[in-house]
Image (tube, rainbow, N blue to C red):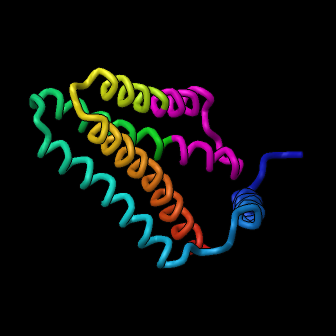
């Protein structure tokens, strides 16, 4: 059997894409869920940042917590993407997959350690923990919705 022609390659690609599409949910996220995800993300992030602005702590401490928020958001989006890619049969290196999980766990640990050692009221520590958790969860939902909508629109 000789090399494939460009038409055969295109047909194989189209067949693989069609099979891939069947394995992915064909339901488009509802506008209500998309909106709720964005509202949750903005609520978590803005609340966390307003808490930092109003906190009685040094600027370097505020920077630490803000950086942890950004680090955590990026990390969970990477985890969601790599898990979803693997689920859909798209190639993801083990190194990237592992790093994504490591950075997600690291961001959580850095927040927990920072809050544990911080000279804050327990209510403030709980506020930062909950707004951080809300932000991370919402970032995953927004990433999922964005990907689902793009996939739905391509079909």
Magenta span of residues = 79-104
Residue at 30% across, 41% down: 123
**76 relative position to 38: left or right:** right
- Asked if residue 92 is among those painted magenta in the image, a careful observer would answer yes
* Residue sitting at the far right: 1
**9 relative position to 83: left or right:** right
Q: Residue 12, position in %: x, y?
A: 76, 59
Please say whether residue 70 is visible from this viewpoint. no
- Asked if residue 93 is among those painted magenta in the image, a careful observer would answer yes
**6 relative position to 92: left or right:** right
For the residue pair 28 and 88, the one nearer the viewer reads as 28
Position of residue 118 relative to residue 153, above or below, is above
Residue at 69% across, 58% down: 6
For the residue pair 81 and 47, the one nearer the viewer reads as 47
Q: Residue 14, position in %: x, y?
A: 71, 65
Residue at 31% across, 45% down: 127
For the residue pair 71 and 150, the one nearer the viewer reads as 71
Asked where in the image residue 28 lies, by quadrant, the reply is: bottom right
């Amino acid at each position: 059997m000789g090399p494939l022609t460009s038409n055969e390659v295109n047909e194989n690609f189209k067949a693989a894409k069609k099979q891939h599409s069947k394995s992915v949910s064909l339901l488009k996220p509802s506008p209500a869920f998309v909106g709720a995800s964005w509202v949750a993300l903005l609520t978590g992030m803005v609340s966390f940042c307003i808490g930092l602005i109003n906190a009685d702590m040094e600027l370097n401490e505020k920077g630490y917590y803000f950086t942890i928020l950004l680090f955590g958001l990026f990390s969970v989006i990477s985890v969601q993407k790599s898990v979803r890619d693997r689920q859909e049969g798209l190639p993801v290196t083990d190194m990237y997959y592992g790093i994504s999980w490591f950075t997600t766990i690291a961001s959580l640990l850095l927040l927990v350690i920072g809050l544990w050692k911080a000279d804050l009221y327990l209510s403030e520590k709980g506020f930062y923990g909950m707004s951080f958790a809300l932000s991370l969860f919402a970032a995953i939902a927004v990433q999922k919705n964005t990907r689902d909508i793009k996939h739905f629109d391509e079909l």
